[in-house]
Image (cartoon, helix red, strand yellow):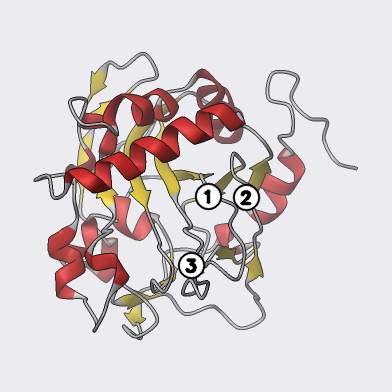
């Protein structure tokens, strides 16, 4: 029998979380606030490259001909850039009380906030090969938690996420080389035999939470006129001993800064520094 939904986090199914490693909370971000976030994202794109915010170096290293991502590279640690259009509004949701309640329910303890990113994924953009988030964050001794906030409807056509249910029980799998004609990142985690990816369909305002061991990825955006914009945030249990140094300082949900031990990205697999900025 499924466990009841938490009274202070309507729509959160802990049974699915425990069984499959993910949970979807529909309509968590109100429509009006989705519009504010989306407008801020596009205003930021118009500003152009900002050091430490635009991941354009990474994009150039993995570029292909006529790459739509050349004008829309992912944005990193957006909550730190409070003087930019994107900073205050994304920080609000990075540290939102609703996110605090859900992360605590899923982790079984209060969380630290580690990372915020924006992905634009314009029409024609490549996807991201299957991967596990904790390969990059290297949270120890447990793992991280992702909150994937849809700012547009996301489905198979515009490159919505696919996840591998049950893969949260796996250790980190060392990645192989990805096909850069289909993926804008060079690493690909192979899916173990007997496991199958599942397409996740989200409406704007839905939030997908998933365990940092979960294998997930996306295909190219094959539409002519649909972006797949998303705000992606990562959290970790407060009891964690270490995380890769790039994500520090961590924040609590009141905005206070914290530092914990430093781990090495990729663990036993190793990782080039270019891959750390997941």
Q: Quadrant of the image for the C terminus?
A: bottom left
Lower position in the chain sequence, tag 1 or tag 2: 2
Quarter location, residue 58: bottom left
What residue is shown with label 2? 22
| Residue drawn 29% across the image and 66% down it | 69
In which quadrant of the rendered image does the N terminus lie? top right
Where is residue 137 drawn, in percent x and y? Answer: 31, 50
Q: Position of residue 24 (x, y in %)?
A: 66, 44
- Residue at image position (38%, 55%) is 120
Q: Residue furthest right?
A: 1
Question: Is 259 rendered above or below residue 225?
Answer: above
In this view, the residue in front, 28 or 22, is 28
Task: Please count the marks in the image.
Answer: 3
- Disc 1 versus disc 3: nearer the observer: 3
Task: Pick whichever of labels 1 and 3 is earlier in the sequence.
Answer: 1
- Tell me what residue is drawn at x 28 percent, y 58 percent: 72
Mark number displayed over residue 211: 1
Q: Is residue 57 left or right of residue 214?
A: left
Q: CA distance from mark 3 to mark 2?
A: 14 Å
Residue that label 3 marks: 217
Give the label, 3 or 2, closer to the camera. 3
């Amino acid at each position: 029998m499924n466990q009841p939904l938490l009274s202070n986090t309507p729509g959160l199914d802990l049974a699915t979380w425990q069984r499959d490693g993910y949970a979807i909370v529909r309509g968590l971000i109100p429509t009006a606030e989705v519009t504010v976030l989306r407008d801020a994202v596009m205003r930021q794109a118009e500003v152009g490259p900002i050091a430490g915010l635009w991941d354009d170096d990474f994009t150039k290293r993995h570029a292909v001909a006529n790459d739509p991502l050349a004008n829309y590279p992912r944005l990193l640690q957006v909550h730190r850039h409070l003087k930019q259009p994107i900073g205050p509004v994304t920080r609000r949701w990075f540290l939102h009380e609703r996110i605090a309640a859900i992360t605590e329910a899923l982790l079984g303890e209060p969380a630290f906030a580690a990372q915020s990113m924006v992905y634009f994924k314009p029409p024609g953009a490549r996807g991201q090969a299957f991967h596990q988030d904790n390969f990059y964050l290297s949270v120890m001794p447990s793992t991280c938690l992702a909150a994937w906030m849809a700012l547009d409807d996301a489905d198979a056509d515009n490159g919505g996420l696919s996840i591998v249910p049950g893969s949260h029980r796996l250790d980190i799998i060392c990645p192989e080389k990805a096909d850069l004609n289909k993926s804008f990142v060079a690493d690909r985690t192979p899916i173990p035999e007997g496991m199958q990816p599942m397409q996740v369909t989200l409406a704007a305002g839905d939030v997908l939470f998933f365990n940092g061991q979960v294998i997930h990825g996306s295909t190219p955006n094959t539409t002519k006129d649909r972006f797949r914009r998303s705000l992606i945030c990562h959290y970790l249990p407060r009891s964690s001993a270490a995380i890769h140094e790039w994500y520090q300082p961590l924040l609590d949900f009141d905005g206070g800064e914290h530092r914990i031990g430093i781990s090495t990205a990729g663990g036993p697999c190793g990782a080039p520094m270019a891959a750390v900025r997941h």
